[in-house]
C-alpha cells in the first residue's frame, strides 16, 4: 500500500471517528452536519473525462459536511472528504463548498466546487495511469439522494477531478457510485 494511501485512510478513519464517537451532541459541538460513506467505481469511462485508463476498481469514499448557511434557495456547506482506491490507483482528499437543495418527496440534490490533492501521476510516465498534470486539482461533485427519515439517506454520487486545462496534461478522473449518509 502506498504511503499516501495509508495517510488518506488514517485521515478518513479519524474524521469518521470524530463524527460518530458520541452521537449527535458531540458531532454538533464540532459543527458537523452530516457524514457520508460509500463505494465508487474508479475512472468510469464515457463521462466527463471521456475515457478510462486506470483499472476500474472500487474507491471507498467518506466525507464530513459542516453546518452551512442559506444561499439562493439552498444551503452552502463546507465539506472535507476522501476517495481511496482499493488497488493503489489514484486516491485523493478534497475540501469543497457544497450547495445542497432539499426537494419535495424527501429528495435532495447537491453540487459543489473545491480542491483535491491526489497521489496519482502528473506526467504520462505510466501506461496504466492517467497524467493528471498537477498535484492539486479541481473537485466537482454532483449528488442526488433520497432521505429515508430525518437522519438517514442514500444517494447516487459523481465526482470529477481535473486541472481544467491549466497544466500540460489534463486527463481527469471520474468516479460514480452509491453512498449512505447520516445527518445529525
Image (cartoon, rainbow, N blue to C red):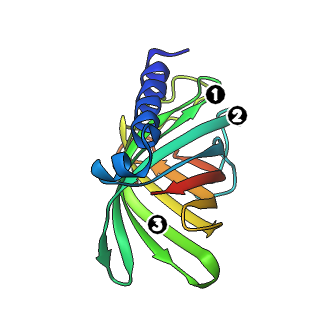
Quadrant of the image occupied by residue 50: bottom right
Task: Choose between 102 and 110: the one closer to the eye.
Answer: 102
In the image, residue 94 lies at what x, y percent?
A: 39, 44
Q: Earlier in the sequence, mark 3 or mark 2?
A: 2
Q: In percent of the image, x 51 and y 23: which residue is there?
A: 125
Residue 91 x/y as whole percent:
51, 33
Q: CA distance from mark 2 to mark 1?
A: 7 Å
Residue lying at 69% horizontally and 56% vertically, measured from the top left = 46
Q: Residue at label 3?
A: 111
Quarter of the image for the C terminus: give it. bottom left
Q: Earlier in the sequence, mark 2 or mark 1?
A: 2
Disc 3: CA contacts within 10 A as few (<14), some (14-19) or many (>=20): some
Foreground of the two, 25 or 162: 25
Per the image, the residue denoted by label 1 is 86
Q: Is residue 155 above or below residue 16?
A: below
* In this rendering, position of residue 81 left or right of residue 129: left
Q: Nearer the viewer, residue 10 or 91?
A: 10
Disc 1 crowd, CA 10 A, few/some/many (<14, 14-19, 20+):
some
Disc 2 is placed on an element classified as: loop
What residue is disc 2 on? Answer: 57
Q: Is residue 23 above or below residue 13?
A: below
Amino acid at each position: 500500500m502506498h504511503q499516501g494511501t495509508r495517510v488518506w485512510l488514517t485521515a478518513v478513519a479519524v474524521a469518521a471517528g470524530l463524527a460518530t464517537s458520541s452521537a449527535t451532541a458531540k458531532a454538533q459541538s464540532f459543527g458537523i452536519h452530516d457524514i457520508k460513506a460509500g463505494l465508487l467505481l474508479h475512472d468510469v469511462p464515457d463521462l466527463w473525462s471521456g475515457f478510462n485508463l486506470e483499472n476500474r476498481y472500487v474507491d471507498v469514499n467518506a466525507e464530513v459536511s459542516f453546518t452551512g448557511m442559506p444561499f439562493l434557495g439552498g444551503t452552502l456547506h463546507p465539506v472535507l472528504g476522501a476517495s481511496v482506491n482499493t488497488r493503489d490507483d489514484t486516491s485523493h482528499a478534497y475540501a469543497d463548498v457544497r450547495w445542497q437543495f432539499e426537494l419535495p418527496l424527501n429528495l435532495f440534490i447537491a453540487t459543489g466546487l473545491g480542491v483535491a490533492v491526489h497521489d496519482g501521476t502528473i506526467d504520462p510516465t505510466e501506461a496504466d495511469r492517467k497524467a493528471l498534470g498537477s498535484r492539486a486539482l479541481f473537485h466537482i461533485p454532483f449528488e442526488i439522494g433520497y432521505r429515508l427519515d430525518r437522519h438517514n439517506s442514500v444517494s447516487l454520487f459523481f465526482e470529477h477531478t481535473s486541472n481544467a486545462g491549466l497544466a500540460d496534461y489534463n486527463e481527469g478522473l471520474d468516479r460514480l457510485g452509491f453512498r449512505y449518509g447520516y445527518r445529525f
